[in-house]
Each structure stands twice: as C-alpha cells, then as structure tokens.
Image (tube, helix red, strand yellow):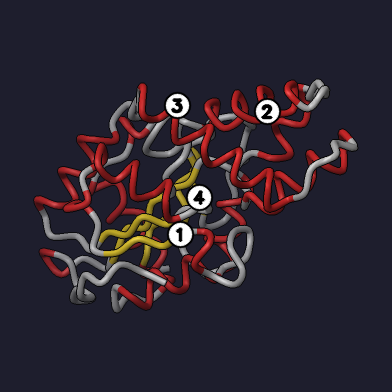
Amino acid sequence: MTTTIPALGTRTAEGSALQAVLLDMDGTLVDTEGFWWDVEVEIFAGLGHTLDDSWRHVVVGGPMSRSAGFLIEATGADIALPELSVLLNDGFEARIGRALPLMPGASRLLAELAAHGVPTALVSASHRRIIDRVLTSLGPQHFALTVAGDEVERTKPFPDPYLLAAAGLGAEPARCAVIEDTATGVAAAEAAGCHVVAVPSVAPIAPAARRTVVTSLEEVDLPFLRGLIGDHVSN
C-alpha cells in the first residue's frame, strides 16, 4: 500500500534517463539502526536474555517478523512474535520521540530532489506507525508516496516494495535509483531491477554490477544519480 498522493510523471527535468529515486529509511536517511538494536537488547534483558552482538548483523535491515523471530529462536525467550513486535515498535517510537538524528547529507539530498521535481518514494521495512512518525522529521512533502513493511505481503529482501514504489511513480525499475544501507535492502532493490547506491551503516557491502558503494550521502547528489542511470541505459 502507498499514501494517497497521486503518481507523478515518468520523466524528471532536463529529459534525464533517471525516472525516480527510491530511498530506504532506517540507517539511510535517519540514523536509527542503532536504536532498533538498543531496543532489542533492552527488551530481551527484561526477559532474562543477553543478545550476542554478532546477531546485530543478522537482524539489521530486515522485516520485523524475520528479525524478531530470529531473536526469539536464538534466545529461547518465552514470548510470542506478535507481543514482541508491539514491544519493539513501542520502544522504538519512544526513542525517536526523544531524538531523531538524520544521516549526514540526507536533508540536502531530499531538498535537491524536490527542487528538481524528481519523483521520490520512501520504501521501508518498518511498520506504517513508525514511518509516519519519522516523516514528521524528514518532511512528508519530500515523498510522492511511501511503502511500509506491514503493507506488503512480502517485504525486503523480496523485490515487491520497490516494484510497488516504481509502479506508483509510473517509473521503470531499470531507470530508478535506490539508496540503501543494508544487504537485505540492496537485495530487494536489485531483485526489482533497480540501480543501487549502497551507503553501508552496520555491515560492509561490496560493489557489484548495477551497485555503487559510497561512504556517505554527502557523496550523492542529483548529477551523480543521473550519471549512474545514464551510464547503464547507454551501455
């Protein structure tokens, strides 16, 4: 599902081959991947279990059903997945209510895309209630639509969220640039046929075909994104 903002045209300004930019949220635009882990550690401590720090790489970037399910199985905690999901969302929402740091370059990039009329979507594995809270800081006006993890039958690493976002913007996946911070998100975007810019937040991500790795959003601007899609289309 998406928000009710109408779909935009398939061409950006100046006739660029870039038709849309699709952005992940946690760890990509907002510095919150650590928040999720802190909440998970706190909740499982209350259940009498200590989380192994190596598990952080397993749960990062994925849907809550997968990450929470893994932690229940790994710890043997006596809690059901639906109950744990509520606790995780409640704990995360409380934390972002106190502080919500944006990633370096995020505000500038969103403003640049908006100024040039580039169709833009927020595509997250987080639930709708979390996305709507974060949007108050990111600025909902920057996104023509948003896709939440609890609004699709299959979320990341499946391609469905990115295919849905591209279709909602009237764009071809091959002419969409996706910005992601985790291997799970990268896998989803690549399976959808998009070109990916990876900005690793927790675990390293290697460069590959149709994938460009940068260290910060401060390295990403509109000419950079147009160049990636233009190079691919012309080859």
Position above or below: 168 against 105 = below
Please, what is the three-letter code of the amino acid marked with disc 3?
Arg
Categorize mark 2 by other alpha carbons within 10 Å: few (<14), some (14-19), many (20+). some
**Secondary-structure class at tag 1:** loop
Q: Nearer the viewer, mark 1 or mark 2?
A: 2
Categorize mark 3 by other alpha carbons within 10 Å: few (<14), some (14-19), many (20+). some
Among numbered discs 1 and 2, the one appearing first in the sequence = 2
Q: Nearer the viewer, mark 3 or mark 4?
A: 3
Contact, mark 4 vs mark 2 (Cβ under 8 Å):
no
**Secondary-structure class at tag 3:** helix
Contact, mark 1 vs mark 4 (Cβ under 8 Å):
yes
Categorize mark 4 by other alpha carbons within 10 Å: few (<14), some (14-19), many (20+). many
Q: Which residue is mark 3?
A: 95
Among numbered discs 1 and 4, the one appearing first in the sequence = 4
Contact, mark 1 vs mark 2 (Cβ under 8 Å):
no
Mark 1 vs mark 3, CA separation in Å: 19 Å
Give coordinates of residue 144: x percent, y percent: 23, 63
Give coordinates of residue 105: x percent, y percent: 28, 31
Quarter of the image for residue 116 reads bottom left
Q: Which residue is mark 4?
A: 126
Q: Any mark on residue 148, and which?
A: 1
Among numbered discs 3 and 2, the one appearing first in the sequence = 2
Contact, mark 3 vs mark 4 (Cβ under 8 Å):
no
Mark 3 vs mark 4, CA separation in Å: 15 Å
Q: Nearer the viewer, residue 126 or 231?
A: 126
Q: Which residue is mark 2?
A: 43
Q: Nearer the viewer, mark 4 or mark 2?
A: 2
Give coordinates of residue 178: x percent, y percent: 42, 55
Position above or below: 225 against 204 = below
Q: Is residue 126 left or right of residue 10?
A: right
